[in-house]
Amino acid sequence: MARYKSLQKKIQKYEKKIRKSRVKLKRKLYQFKNYVFKFGISTKEDFELVKPSLLNISLPCHLGIVSIGKFNLNLIQKIQYNIEQKFDSFFFNIYNLGRYKFPKEVFNKGIKRELKEIENTTELLELHPTNKIYQLLIDLAKSNNLDMILAVTDLPLYSSNNSNIIFLFGEAHIRHNCCVVSSLKLKEEYYNRAKNKTILELRLIKETTHELGHLIIGPEHCDNNLCVMTFSREIEGIDNKSIRFCDKCYQKLIKIREINNF
Ligand SMILES: [Zn+2]
Ligand SMILES: [Zn+2]
């Protein structure tokens, strides 16, 4: 019996090793694919963004929120209310631009198929490049006279700017003053757990604050892992941090307010 148990343990160890090297191999393959892309052997970038303006926007400014996917108005209003509180006086107005649906030909562009990143999964997801979202946001900001814009989407995303990040919670394009948060990996269902509206709301509030924080404070992350500006690789990191800025980050906001005289 003991022999059987030790054999079983050995098998489990090997299975774990195989799983690990499978993930490693997938990463390597992905890196190789990107390497090939860089040299133009494969398709060219589907979304080439216009050159951003070199001028910094002046603060306070006008912010817009657009939802790409199904979100109820109440949730968007909660996100909006939180932004008003956290970035008090940074925005003249926050406009809800409502729901946007990509035309089919745009929707299908740049899609990458990836395995859902949780253990023992065979489910394939279609990931969209962040540049697709940014292009839309740049156009929407222009047509609505907005300085800054946030998208909340239920689409799975990959980064057009960092090939090491396959799956995103969110990303900000600082020079273009726009950012996006995806709800997909913030949902309990993604981790095969029961749906929970309250948890999803809280995570969305944290991540939208975080990405807008980048647009206002800058690209750096906070080393205080309770601060909303800390970098979270996994969902546990998001749950562990608070919805607030730490003192250091809050002081940065105050300083920006002072520099801009408001
Ligand atoms: Zn960040
Ligand atoms: Zn901080």
Image (cartoon, rainbow, N blue to C red):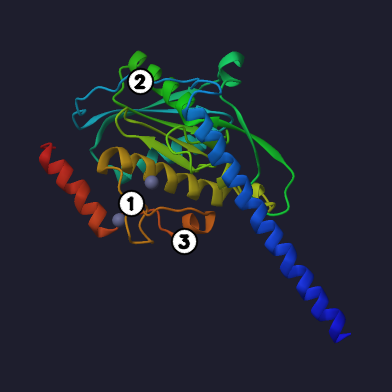
Q: Is mark 1 within 8 Å of ligand 1?
A: yes
Q: Determine which of the numbered discs, if any, sits on residue 240 in the image.
A: 3
- Whether the residue carrying mark 2 lies under 8 Å from ligand 1 is answered with no
Q: Is residue 214 left or right of residue 128?
A: left
Q: What is the crowding at mark 1: few (fewer than 14 residues within 10 Å), some, or many (at least 20)?
A: some
199 up-or-down from 51: above or below: below
Residue 88, image x, y percentages = 26, 42
| Nearest to the observer: residue 7 or residue 51 | 7
Query: Which of the 4 image quadrants contains residue 16?
Result: bottom right
Question: CA gap, disc 1 to disc 3?
Answer: 16 Å
Is the CB of mark 3 within 8 Å of ligand 2?
Answer: no
Question: Can you give x and y, in whole percent of width and height, for residue 71 in the image?
Answer: 56, 33
Q: Callout 2: 10 Å neighbours few (<14), some, many (20+)?
A: many
Earlier residue among tags 1 and 2: 2
What's the residue type where badge 3 is placed?
Answer: Asn
Where is mark 2, residue-wise?
141
Residue 139 bears which disc, if any?
none
Name the residue furthest right: 1
Q: Which mark is residue 221?
A: 1
Left or right of 21 in this view: 42: left
The residue sitting at 37% across, 53% down in the picture is 228
Residue 211 can be seen in this image = yes
**In front here: 163 or 173?**
163
First along the sequence among labels 1 and 3 = 1
* Residue 248 left/right relative to 258: right
* Residue at x 56% of width, y 20% of height: 101
> What residue lies at 32% left-to-right and 55% top-to-bottom?
222
**Residue 4 versus residue 37: which sits nearer the camera?**
37
Residue 181: percent from left, percent from top: 47, 38
Kind of residue indicated by mark 2: Ala
